């Protein structure tokens, strides 16, 4: 690791908020709990929407699942805020881990897929039109990237190679 990055990570990890997040019992575990809830709402909502687009709930009109986008937004707020807290506690551990980058890339692509589904598939369904031909492919792609987000998050626990503080 580059000396300037080492100095930057050391400065962050020695800051009062980082020490508080890492060394006090409650802040870190509260952030973990909110991150888990946020990811459950975000990814869970995404899975439901994708499965609905794929026709798993044929007896329900697709536009009835549009409320899951609100659930996903709430989950995203929880996940992002708590994720910043977790990152503040151990910046070198996450930011030097390629799995973290893979998780973020998967998250961005899954989010873009969901945005496409909201704008195209759900817009068509709301107007009573057939789904655009690419809807099923985008839903499958989103499912794969949601899986990548979850797998990346779990692998982060075990794949770090840089831990400046303990």
Image (spheres, grey):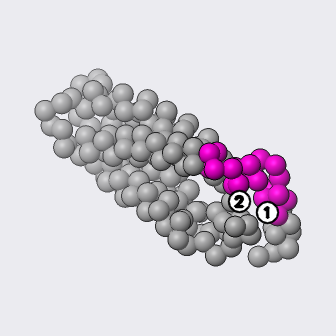
> Which quadrant of the rendered structure holds the C terminus?
bottom right
Res. 115 in view: no
What distance separates the C-alpha of mark 2 from that of mark 1?
A: 6 Å
- Asked if the residue at tag 1 contacts the one at tag 2, i.e. Cβ–Cβ closer than 8 Å, the answer is yes
| Residue at the (82%, 64%) spot, across then down | 10
Secondary structure state at the residue bearing disc 2: helix
Could you say where residue 161 lies in the image, as x and y percent from the top left? 64, 76
What is the magenta segment's predominant secondary structure?
Answer: helix
| Residue at the (19%, 43%) spot, across then down | 56
Report whether 27 appears left or right of 124: right
Secondary structure state at the residue bearing disc 1: helix
> Outermost residue toward the left?
59
Q: Which residue lies under the disc numbered 2?
A: 91
Observer-nearest of 160 and 49: 160
Q: Which residue lies under the disc numbered 1?
A: 9
Res. 16 in view: yes
Q: Residues within 10 Å of mark 2 (few under 14, many from 20)?
A: many
The mark that comes first in sequence, 2 or 1, is 1
Report whether 157 appears left or right of 138: right
Could you say where residue 73 lies in the image, as x and y percent from the top left? 49, 34
Q: Which residues are magenta?
A: 10-28
Q: Is residue 61 magenta?
A: no
> Which quadrant of the rendered structure holds the N terminus?
bottom right
């Amino acid at each position: 690791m580059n000396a300037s990055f080492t100095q930057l990570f050391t400065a962050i990890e020695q800051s009062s908020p980082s020490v508080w997040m890492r060394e006090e019992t409650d802040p870190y575990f509260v952030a973990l709990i909110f991150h888990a809830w946020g990811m459950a709402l975000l990814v869970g909502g995404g899975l439901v929407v994708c499965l609905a687009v794929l026709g798993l709930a044929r007896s329900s009109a697709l536009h009835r699942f549009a409320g899951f986008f609100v659930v996903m937004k709430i989950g995203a707020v929880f996940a992002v805020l708590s994720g910043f807290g977790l990152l503040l506690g151990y910046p070198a551990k996450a930011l030097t881990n390629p799995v973290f980058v893979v998780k973020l890339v998967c998250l961005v692509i899954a989010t873009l897929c969901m945005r496409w589904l909201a704008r195209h598939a759900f817009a068509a369904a709301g107007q009573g039109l057939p789904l655009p031909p690419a809807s099923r492919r985008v839903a499958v792609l989103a499912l794969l990237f949601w899986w990548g987000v979850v797998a990346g998050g779990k692998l982060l626990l075990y794949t770090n190679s840089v831990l400046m503080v303990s």
